[in-house]
């Protein structure tokens, strides 16, 4: 197993841009039936590619859709066309928006670290581990109906898998998306055991990637439960032989 992606940040960005260019063109030519517009397409991926391509472990959040709260709050106006670049800009400016804080908290359990937000250099380093893949690329609101999410995931199936392959994560956190992601990413999801097992290895032989299913980072009422689930999953996975760097 390689500790880093086999490409430079520039090569990653080129591949990402080409993928999304083709993806968005397909939307413009054949707009998804359920209201998606080419101009609503929101790019995602690694938040800070210069860090992501060289760190280990790489942590990918598979979520439902990008939220666009511009109608309700103009302060969130940077949500939109390129989620990763907008987020990276916010991070560099010291933005402590709650969803990103929760994602960092989740990631902290995976890395065995805590971030206090007091050190900008540490924040940049921490976000270098993170990437996001939304199964539905069109802007949404606070919730999305399952049938709409499933339709988009089916419509974009091959490109979703291509993006997942490009990001090549070591840990994949399914934020309330286990049913959709299991199909879209062709996962063999084990049946929950008597204690509600919520993690598994994508490849048992290599123990990689490590999948963890938990609550969405925006599910504020369940954050304590989610952190506990991730912590327990990491403990169990390590007991089963998971290690990084791989041994």
Image (cartoon, rainbow, N blue to C red):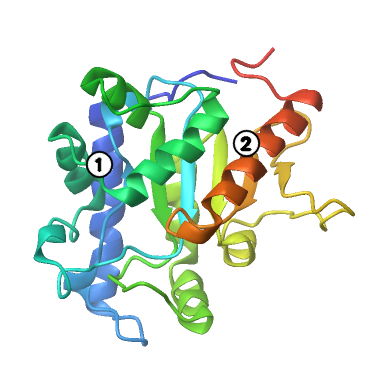
Give the residue displayed 56% in from the left and 31% down from the top: 110
**Quadrant holding the N terminus:** top right
Q: Position of residue 247 (x, y in %)?
A: 69, 12
Q: Quadrant of residue 177?
A: bottom right
The residue lying at 80 percent from left, 54 percent from top is: 196
Pointer 2: what residue?
209
Residue 161, label in figure: none
> Is residue 64 placed above or below 10 in the rendered structure?
below
On screen, residue 82 above or below 48? below
For this rendering, which residue is in front, 146 or 121?
A: 121
Q: Position of residue 14 (x, y in %)?
A: 24, 39
Tell me the residue at 11%/59% (across/down): 75
Q: Position of residue 226 (x, y in %)?
A: 59, 49
Using residue 8 as the reference point, say whether residue 92 is left or right of it: left
* Residue at the image point whose x is 12% and y is 35% from the top: 93
Up-down: is 123 above or below 39?
above
Depth order, front residue of 164/48: 48
Alpha-carbon neighbours of circle 2 within 10 Å: few (<14), some, or many (≥20)?
A: many
Q: Earlier in the sequence, mark 1 or mark 2?
A: 1
Residue 200 in the figure: left or right of residue 175: right
Please, which residue is most extreme toward the right here? 194
Q: Residue furthest top?
A: 247
Could one spot residue 4 in this view of the protein?
Answer: yes
Q: Residue 156's spot in the image, x, y percent?
A: 43, 68
Callout 2: SS: loop
Mark closer to the observer (1, 2): 1
Q: Is residue 228 above or below residue 184?
A: above
Q: Between marks 1 and 2, how big is the CA–CA gap?
A: 29 Å
Q: Contact (CB < 8 A) between labels 1 and 2? A: no
Q: Which residue is mark 1?
A: 96
């Amino acid at each position: 197993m390689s500790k880093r992606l086999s490409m430079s940040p520039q090569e990653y960005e080129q591949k990402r841009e080409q993928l999304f260019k083709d993806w968005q063109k397909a939307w413009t030519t054949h707009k998804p039936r359920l209201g998606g517009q080419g101009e609503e397409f929101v790019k995602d991926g690694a938040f800070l590619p210069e860090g992501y391509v060289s760190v280990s472990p790489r942590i990918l959040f598979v979520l439902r859709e990008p939220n666009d709260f511009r109608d309700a709050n103009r302060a969130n106006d940077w949500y939109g066309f390129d989620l990763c670049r907008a987020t990276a800009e916010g991070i560099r400016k010291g933005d402590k928006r709650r969803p990103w804080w929760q994602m960092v908290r989740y990631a902290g359990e995976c890395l065995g670290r805590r971030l206090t937000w007091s050190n900008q250099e540490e924040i940049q380093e921490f976000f270098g581990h993170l990437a996001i893949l939304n199964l539905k690329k069109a802007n949404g609101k606070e919730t999305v109906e399952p049938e709409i999410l499933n339709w988009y995931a089916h419509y974009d199936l091959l490109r979703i898998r291509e993006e997942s392959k490009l990001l090549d994560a070591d840990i994949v956190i399914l934020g309330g998306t286990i049913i959709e992601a299991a199909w879209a990413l062709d996962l063999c999801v084990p049946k929950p055991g008597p204690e509600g097992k919520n993690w598994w290895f994508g490849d048992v032989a290599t123990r990689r990637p490590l999948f963890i299913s938990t609550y969405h980072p925006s599910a504020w009422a369940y954050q304590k439960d989610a952190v506990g689930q991730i912590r327990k999953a990491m403990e169990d996975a390590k007991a089963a032989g998971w290690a990084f760097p791989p041994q």
